[in-house]
Image: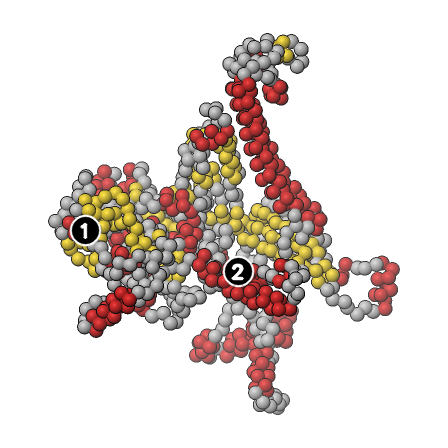
């Protein structure tokens, strides 16, 4: 309304009312505009804290109610606070918020990018938001005010499109919950370096130029007219009227989208798929940074928190696969705190994560990059995390591709791979599955963990230790036992003879039945870890104790090393400090009793070398002030040791305390199995431009098309996947990748500001490659050239989390549904295939009556029939008659429950 009232005034004034009425009257007369409900100035973000605060308030109100009730019942003179206050409602409210709120989601940890994106996600759903069915087109659509605030590209396909979005690269949320975007201030056509953040409302009031507006060395805009964004429209104005300018061309897109090179040449729908599929890429065994990147890879990797970064400058003291120790240079402040010595040193110990399981069962593993005695700066990458290569995000592999049909194997987006990629483990990933087993206290007795399982042969138990848990490092396959567990059977009526035998020989082992954990079908790998949780350490088996002692030994080793380093450092400093100082009393050698140094003489290095560390404390200096400094070094080091000791005691205490388990559970065992998955037929692969496909065949190297110099291609893609999809970015990436690989370069081509056609042609010419990016290929089978030239080059390909091993499923017999007696459905339940009405019609149309009858009875829910047919198959007899399906009985019971008396009458 344009009223100049300070923000501190929080009440309505007469002027407010007057201006509001004036605006409404003008609206009626056709002046002014109605507020746009989808404008970002009208929509604010509610952060986790705010949502939690609301839940907390609900909990406090409930608690207040109970307190008031108790106050009316209890005698307030004698009542204590804990008699009145019950914190359960507050705890329950918070637990409910994190446990069952629609917005409390299981973090996507497929790769570092997936995690970062999940943390930057915005949702219009949830409590106080919209519902999928009621959200119309306008809410989901891209709005001009999204520019620089919400990514117009990254959103899910399907019912949530436009409702779940992502924060743009440089956007931030202000204290009121509105999204702000950064801009450079422009004064009198001169672009300044200071950056201001504007909300959508402020942005609309200013003329904002694009980031690639031409400016000279002094920052003055050189163009005669400038295309600007003003109040949601694009108009051209004179340079003097420009008020702000974008900070970067990539500020309009999100992090995942900013990782797609040549994004400006891709259709938005395919770019959307590309952004979403990068989040599904599995971290590969040997990560390889893209030859053609956008320059964002390093920033994403650094901010993901998976790489290990140096906290301070220093030198690598020791490095192995599990930890890095850096001898750090202390800052001036730390030096002053320690003493006035110039040569102060501290130590930073970085522990690396080895073969940890992520939420999506991918492998989190850190590898050190530094070497001994290497100098590091603060912020340097010390170790790579998953899907990282020397501090850069590396989600896939650079492969040599050709766009051409090959014997129909790349029909409909299928992908043809070279066997070399499998052989060299280029697309091999490690997946860690977790299996857990609970031991409960039942009415019949305790469930027990044991290696002595009834009716199980020796061979099946060979990988178990004495307490019944599989060895770490054992190779397991489907059907192997991971944890031995026996549960007490219910009491059975015994015959007098059995009772007599029981009385003579005592209890027999037949009272227990096997309830062990077996490896499920489709899982084959190596046991990498076993965790045992029990109520108290007394409960823990010998196995658990040994695991615990290993952990405490590791902690002890680290603690000893840290103490030793500090002690050495202390004596080194004291020795350095003592040289040149006058001594206050004679120094005598402990073994011989000889006088090493007379009183008031200066201490030399030679004398110091003869004095052991322990004796240094006993030296008395002539100068009292200098003696004080030595004491200060001692005190400083003692403080450091105390801090270390406290941290160590806390860790050991945590090990000795029992674990908190749900009621009724005595023990809980988790077994982790690591599986190596090579790329194979049926796996889903994709590029970064939404060009996805399924591997249709892995072909021998010698059969693949090859170049004139004999180099075979790695991947053959279908050229028909490009024109209709309009994602030409993949072709430009292929050309530039070819040139960059030949020149031995890695190139960064940022979004909306990348390499031009001219740049690519220049690089191809420099690499002495054809400027068309196409070349002659020869058939690997016949050696004859293919007709016409083929586009070849380097493309970055990802292996996605949709792996055929997780989806393939087969069943001969298995669990049945209790009510209908039909097999269950789905891989998780080890179910059967559904035979729906359309399948029945198909069989009817062919007149396959016997097959159909078999499907609907003995292969499904004819309980007696299915055991009879099994018997007949085993004995080799012909089987003819099918019985009554159980679903028919269910139908009869349903009709009877409706009051219709239906009964079968035998004819």
Q: Counting other residues with Cα less than 10 Å from the Cα at mark 2, is it few (<14), some (14-19), or many (20 or more)?
A: some
Q: Is residue 130 in sight in this rendering?
A: yes
Residue ID at (52%, 50%): 357
Q: Please, is residue 44 above or below residue 467 in the view?
A: below
- Residue ID for mark 2: 94
Measured from the top left, where is residue 735 in percent x and y? 27, 46
Q: Is residue 236 left or right of residue 584?
A: left
Residue ID at (46%, 24%): 342
- Residue ID for mark 1: 242
Q: Secondary structure at mark 2?
A: helix
User: Could you tell me how far apart the alpha carbons at marks 2 and 1 are, in whole angstroms?
Assistant: 49 Å
| Mark positioned earlier in the residue sequence (2 or 1) | 2
Q: Secondary structure at mark 1?
A: loop
In the rendered view of the protein, which quadrant contains the C terminus? bottom right
Q: Give the image's coloring scheme.
A: secondary structure
Q: Is residue 114 in sight in this rendering?
A: no
Which of the 4 quarters of the picture holds residue 653?
top right
* Count of number-bearing discs: 2
Q: Are marks 2 and 1 in contact (CB under 8 Å)?
A: no
Q: Is residue 490 left or right of residue 384?
A: right
């Amino acid at each position: 309304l344009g009223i100049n009232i300070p923000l501190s005034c929080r009440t309505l004034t007469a002027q407010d009312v007057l201006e509001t009425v004036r605006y409404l009257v003008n609206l009626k007369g056709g002046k002014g505009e109605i507020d746009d409900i989808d404008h970002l100035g009208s929509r604010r973000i509610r952060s986790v804290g705010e949502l939690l605060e609301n839940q907390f308030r609900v909990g406090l109100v409930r608690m207040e109610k109970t307190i008031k009730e108790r106050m009316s019942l209890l005698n307030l003179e004698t009542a204590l606070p804990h008699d009145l206050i019950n914190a359960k409602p507050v705890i329950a409210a918070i637990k409910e918020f994190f446990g069952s709120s629609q917005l409390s989601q299981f973090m996507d940890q497929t790769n570092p990018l997936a995690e970062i994106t999940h943390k930057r996600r915005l949702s219009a759903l949830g409590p106080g938001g919209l519902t999928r069915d009621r959200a119309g087109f306008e809410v989901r659509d891209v709005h001009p005010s999204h520019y620089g605030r919400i990514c117009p590209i990254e959103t899910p396909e399907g019912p949530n499109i436009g409702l779940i979005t992502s924060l743009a690269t440089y956007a931030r949320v202000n204290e009121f919950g509105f999204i702000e975007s950064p801009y450079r201030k422009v004064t009198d056509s001169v672009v300044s370096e200071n950056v201001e953040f504007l909300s959508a409302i402020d942005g609309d009031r200013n003329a904002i130029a694009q980031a690639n507006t031409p400016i000279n060395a002094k920052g003055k805009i050189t163009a005669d007219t400038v295309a600007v964004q003003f109040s949601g429209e694009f108009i051209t104005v004179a340079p003097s009227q420009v008020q702000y300018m974008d900070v970067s061309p990539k500020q309009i897109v999100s992090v995942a989208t900013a990782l797609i090179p040549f994004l400006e040449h891709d259709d938005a729908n395919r770019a959307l798929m590309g952004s979403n599929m990068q989040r599904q890429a599995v971290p590969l065994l040997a990560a390889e940074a893209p030859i053609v990147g956008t320059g964002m890879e390093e920033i994403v990797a650094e901010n993901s928190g998976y790489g290990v970064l140096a906290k301070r400058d220093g030198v690598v003291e020791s490095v192995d696969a599990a930890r890095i120790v850096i001898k750090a240079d202390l800052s001036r402040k730390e030096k002053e705190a320690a003493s006035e010595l110039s040569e102060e040193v501290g130590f930073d110990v970085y522990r690396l994560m080895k073969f940890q399981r992520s939420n999506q069962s991918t492998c989190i593993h850190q590898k050190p990059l530094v070497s001994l005695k290497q100098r590091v700066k603060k912020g340097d990458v010390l170790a790579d995390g998953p899907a990282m290569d020397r501090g850069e995000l590396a989600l896939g592999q650079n492969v040599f591709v050709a766009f051409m049909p090959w014997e129909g194997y790349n029909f409909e987006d299928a992908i043809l791979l070279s066997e070399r990629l499998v052989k060299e483990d280029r697309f091999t990933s490690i997946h860690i599955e977790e299996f857990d087993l609970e031991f409960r206290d039942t009415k019949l007795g305790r469930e027990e963990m044991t290696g002595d399982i009834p009716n199980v042969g020796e061979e099946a138990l060979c990988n178990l230790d004495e307490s019944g848990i599989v060895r770490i490092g054992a190779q397991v396959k489907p059907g192997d036992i991971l944890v031995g567990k026996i549960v007490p059977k219910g009491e059975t009526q015994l015959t007098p003879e059995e009772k007599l035998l029981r009385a003579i020989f005592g209890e027999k082992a037949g009272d227990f039945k096997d309830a062990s954990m077996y490896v499920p079908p489709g899982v084959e790998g190596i046991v990498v870890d076993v965790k045992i949780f029990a109520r108290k350490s007394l409960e823990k088996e010998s196995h658990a104790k040994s695991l615990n002692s290993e952990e405490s030994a590791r902690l002890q080793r680290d603690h000893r090393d840290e103490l030793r380093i500090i002690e050495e450092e202390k004596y080194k400093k004291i020795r350095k400090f003592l040289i040149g100082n006058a001594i206050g009393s004679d120094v005598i050698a402990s073994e011989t009793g000889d006088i090493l140094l007379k009183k008031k003489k200066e201490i030399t290095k030679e004398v110091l070398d003869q004095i052991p560390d322990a004796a240094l404390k006993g030296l008395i200096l002539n100068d009292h002030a200098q003696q004080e400094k030595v004491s200060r070094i001692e005190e400083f080091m003692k403080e450091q040791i105390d801090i270390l000791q406290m941290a160590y005691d806390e860790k050991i205490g945590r090990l000795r305390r029992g674990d908190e388990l749900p009621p009724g559970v005595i023990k809980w065992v988790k077994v982790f199995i690591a599986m190596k998955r090579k790329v194979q037929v049926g796996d889903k692969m994709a590029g970064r431009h939404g060009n996805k496909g399924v591997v249709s065949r892995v072909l021998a190297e010698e059969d693949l098309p090859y170049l004139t110099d004999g180099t075979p291609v790695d991947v053959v893609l279908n050229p028909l996947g490009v024109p209709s999809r309009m994602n030409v970015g993949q072709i430009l990436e292929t050309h530039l990748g070819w040139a960059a690989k030949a020149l031995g370069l890695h190139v960064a081509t940022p979004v909306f500001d990348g390499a031009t056609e001219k740049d690519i042609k220049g690089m191809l010419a420099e690499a002495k490659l054809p400027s068309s990016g196409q070349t002659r290929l020869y058939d690997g089978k016949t050696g004859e050239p293919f007709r016409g030239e083929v586009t070849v080059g380097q493309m970055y390909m990802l292996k996605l989390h949709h792996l055929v091993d997780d989806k393939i499923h087969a069943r001969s017999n298995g669990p049945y549904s209790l009510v209908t007696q039909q097999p269950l459905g789905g891989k998780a339940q080890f179910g059967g295939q559904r035979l729906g009405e359309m399948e029945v019609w198909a069989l009817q149309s062919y007149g396959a009556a016997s097959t159909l009858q078999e499907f609907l009875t003995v292969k499904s829910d004819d309980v007696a029939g299915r055991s009879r047919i099994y018997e007949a198959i085993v004995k080799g007899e012909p089987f003819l008659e099918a019985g009554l399906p159980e679903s028919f009985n269910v139908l009869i019971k349903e009709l009877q429950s409706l009051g219709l008396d239906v009964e079968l009458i035998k004819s």
